Structure formats: C-alpha cells, structure tokens
Image (cartoon, grey):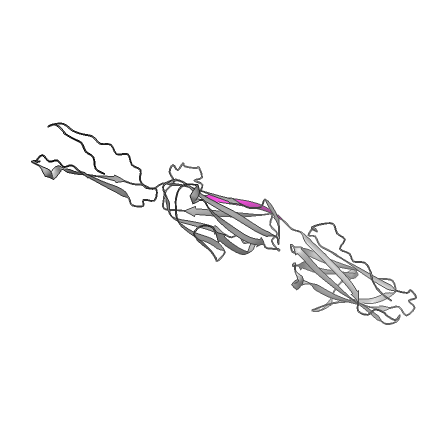
Amino acid sequence: MSCQLGTVVGGGSATITVPVSVDAGYSSTDVINSASASSQTPDPNPGNNTGTDTTAVTGLADLTLTKSGPAAARAGDPISWTLALVNAGPSTAQNVQLTDPIPAAVVGASVSSTHGSCTITAAVLACDIGALAPGDVARIQVFVAAAVDPSFDGSSIVNTATVVSPTAEPDPQPGIPDGRTASATTSITAAADLAVSKVPATATVTPGQQASWTVTVINNGPSTARSVTLTDTVPAGLSGVTYTGTGGPLSCPGDVCQLADLLPGAGNVVVITVTGLLDPAFADAAVANSVQVASVTRRPDTRQQTPPPAPCR
C-alpha cells in the first residue's frame, strides 16, 4: 500500500488509518505490520523512518455439532444417525477431530462422510475433518449406518459424538454446553415373527404302525424370540409320542417343548421330528396332528402362527 501525503510542515504529523481483517484461516499467533516514510527532503535521522507493530492473534471458532437418529427402533432393525458440524466462525477451526463411540447394542456399523476421512476401529468412529472454515459452506455431514443387535434387550440406545479442535470457542460460559458434543436417544422394543410348519413323513400310515411328522420353527425377526415354546396337540389314537431334535431326543413334558431363545434367520431354524404309534384299532380316514409355537416376545403383527393340522391318511 502506498499513500501520497503531500507536504508535512515541521513539527506536524499525518495520521493514516487502515482498516483490515485478519484472514479467517490465519494460523500464526501474531501479525507483524511495518510501514516506512520517505521524502525528497533530506532527513537528518533516517533510522526512525520505519515503524513496526506486532499484534497477537487468537483464533476462535464457534463449532456446533448436532446428531439426529430415529426416535424408536426394534432390536434387529437397521438404524442410522446423521451428524452435522457447522463452524459459525469467526476463525477457521484447525485440526478438527470427531469421535463417536458406537454403542455396544449396534452391529455392522459403516460410515460415509461429505468432508474429511472417517474410519471405525474397535467400535469407535473417528473422523479427521482437518481445517473447517466458517460459514454455511463449511457444513459437513457424517452418516452412520448399522443395525440394532437382534438380541439387545435394553430399553434404549444413546449415541454420543464429540468434536474437538485446538481453536477455542469465542465465548465459553461455565456450566453451559459449548455445542461440541451431541447425543441421540432411540427407544428400543423387541418383536419376533415366529413361523412353524409341520409335514408328515409319509403321505399314508397304517394303524398299528409308527406315524411321524417333521416340525420346523423359524424366527423371521427382526428380534430374537425369547423363551420359545412348542406345543404339540397329540391326536387321539396316537401313543408313545417322542420328540427328537438335531442334537437327539428332547424332553417335552405334557407335549410342550421348551426351545429357549431363537435368533432370527434361516440359519437358526429348529427342526423336530414327532413320532408316535397309531392305535391298531384306529378307524378314521385320517389322523391330524397340529402344533403351536409361542414366545414371550411380542409378534410384529397378529397373523396366526399355528399351522393347520398335518394329516396322514
């Protein structure tokens, strides 16, 4: 910058005011400004024709982190959160880091970000945001996608994220949150869609011989079904009924089998073989055997889960 001051009389002075702003991204601790004066008139003391001023600079960044997620979900359902970080300035926030410990009830988490780089290591989401300039253009979002553990039996999931930067807040107030931490709470319920099928081992059976059925129980989810029981309605004329699972004979007092907890999915089906002796005097045209499955975990809907009787003729 150069200024023409014209003639300055002996003993006089000239004042120049230069309004400037420190760049928002300036990261040094001070600003040094020097100015020099010169004239065609000889100066008896030219050593004082340059002046220097040093101004301390402190960066301040008003960071605000928000987190949004579903108000409610079921164990086993997908779940996701969105984090938004805004720098209201006035300075660029330097070396911004975001951390978000993934709750233990969440499985299969993945992350994508519109700014910086994010990884998930040892169930902790970490994002290296770097320098974050002030203003709406600096808005960044981090998306987290996962699923609630189908066996989670708690009532809620709380997910908390924190952002840090060596650039201080502009006006911190004791006891008042600085906006650099955000949480989202999701209430969790359980629901399990149990289904059961029963088919005869043979299409026909002869009185006085063994009759056999195969029972298959599956949990279509989304949650783990707790304390599953299978009740077999033994038809008249069938005696000596036994129940055999994939691991061997089952104890089913009163024709009720306790199956414990059943995880969702086709890989967790329970298969039971029901066998009994048909009375030699059985005279009906068919023998029908029905079965019912139940759980203390509520069903997602009210569909009938008891199949029609499986007849053998």
**Is residue 204 found left or right of 67 in the rendered image?**
right
Indicate the quadrant where residue 23 lies. Answer: top left
Residue 185 located within the stretch drawn in magenta: yes
**Is residue 38 found left or right of 221 in the rendered image?**
left
Residue 152 located within the stretch drawn in magenta: no
Residue stretch rendered in magenta on the structure: 181-188
Q: Residue at x 50, y 54 (%)?
A: 111
Position of residue 47 measured from the top left corner of the image (x, y, whole percent): 11, 39
For the C terminus, the quadrant is bottom right
Q: Nearer the viewer, residue 274 or 137?
A: 137
Asked if one can make out residue 233 in the rendered structure from this viewpoint, the answer is: no
Q: Residue at x 18, y 29 (%)?
A: 14
Q: Residue at x 26, y 34 (%)?
A: 18
**Is residue 301 found left or right of 163 in the rendered image?**
right
Position of residue 37 measured from the top left corner of the image (x, y, whole percent): 16, 36
Indicate the quadrant where residue 210 lies. Answer: bottom right
